Image (cartoon, rainbow, N blue to C red):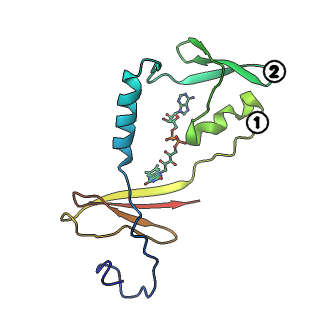
Amino acid sequence: LEQVNPHISEQFQEAIYFPELSNIRNPRVLQSLIRYLKQHPNVEFFEHTPVKKLIQQGDVIQALQTEDGRKHTADHFVITSGAWSHYWNSQLQLEIPVEPVQGQMLLFKTPAHWLPTMCMNRVMYLIPRMDGHIVCGSSMA
Ligand SMILES: Cc1cc2nc3c(=O)[nH]c(=O)nc-3n(C[C@H](O)[C@H](O)[C@H](O)COP(=O)(O)OP(=O)(O)OC[C@H]3O[C@@H](n4cnc5c(N)ncnc54)[C@H](O)[C@@H]3O)c2cc1C
């Protein structure tokens, strides 16, 4: 353990090392995805446009209505509203099994390459970025 990561406390006697495990900076991934989608000829992008209503015929969603009153029809809809997905339960008369869970996150600045590996246990994780920032997070399901 000391060879792989000298910052790990001596109180830990065992760990599993995944040398192939890596991480990405999610805000940057999203920014590049958005940039790609915005220049794609088949994509129309509506930002800051909350969806208020799903218009159904039988079991099929035929259109959605946004807060500004506009309607958008499509053959298929994908609901990706994350922790807010329970909003659709009453409209769709479904129980969407997604709910928010408690989480905390801090960002520390250390010298570059100070922490050589990601560290995770059952309740928290440390993720070193290349510039020395360390994301310290904890989510409890
Ligand atoms: C502080 C923090 C740190 C995290 N760190 C990590 C991490 O390091 N690694 C990891 O894997 N996961 C992490 N997570 C969890 C991860 O962010 C979520 O699991 C992931 O974002 C869920 O993606 P999603 O697309 O399902 O939902 P979201 O990313 O929550 O996206 C849902 C989107 O739907 C939009 N929306 C909701 N309702 C409507 C509506 N009526 N009309 C229009 N839009 C609507 C919301 O505005 C939002 O943009 C973290 C979460 C938090 C809060």
Q: Residue at x 46, y 85 (%)?
A: 14
Instruction: Determine the image quadrant of residue 108.
Output: bottom left
Q: Residue 129 versus residue 91: which sits nearer the camera?
A: 129
Q: Position of residue 69 (x, y in %)?
A: 57, 11
Q: Residue furthest left?
A: 111
Which residue: 36% across, 22% down?
39
Q: Element type at marker 2?
A: loop
Ranked by sequence position, the earlier of labels 1 and 2 is 2
Instruction: Give the residue type at disc 1.
Output: Leu
Measured in 3D between alpha carbons, the distance from the residue under mark 1 to the one under mark 2, in whole angstroms, is: 13 Å
Q: Is residue 27 above or below residue 8?
A: above
Q: Which mark is residue 58?
A: 2
Return the mark for residue 94: 1
x then y, percent, for residue 122: 52, 71
Tag in front: 1 or 2: 2
Please state the horizontal and vertical placement of residue 63, each as a whole percent of the image. 65, 17
Left or right, 68 with respect to 21, comes to: right
Measuring from the top left, give residue 32's x and y in whole percent: 35, 36
Hey, which quadrant is residue 141 in on the image? bottom right
**What amino acid is found at the position of numbered circle 2 in the picture?**
Gly
Question: Which dot marks residue 110?
Answer: none
Q: Is residue 4 above or below residue 70?
A: below
The crowd level at tag 2 (other Cα within 10 Å; few <14, some 14-19, many 20+) is: few
- The residue at the far top in this view is 70
In the figure, 36 relative to 3: above or below?
A: above
> Who is closer to the viewer here, 18 or 47?
18
Quadrant for the N terminus, please: bottom left
Q: Residue at x 45, y 80 (%)?
A: 15
Q: Is residue 20 left or right of residue 81?
A: left
- Indicate whether 84 appears above or below 77: below
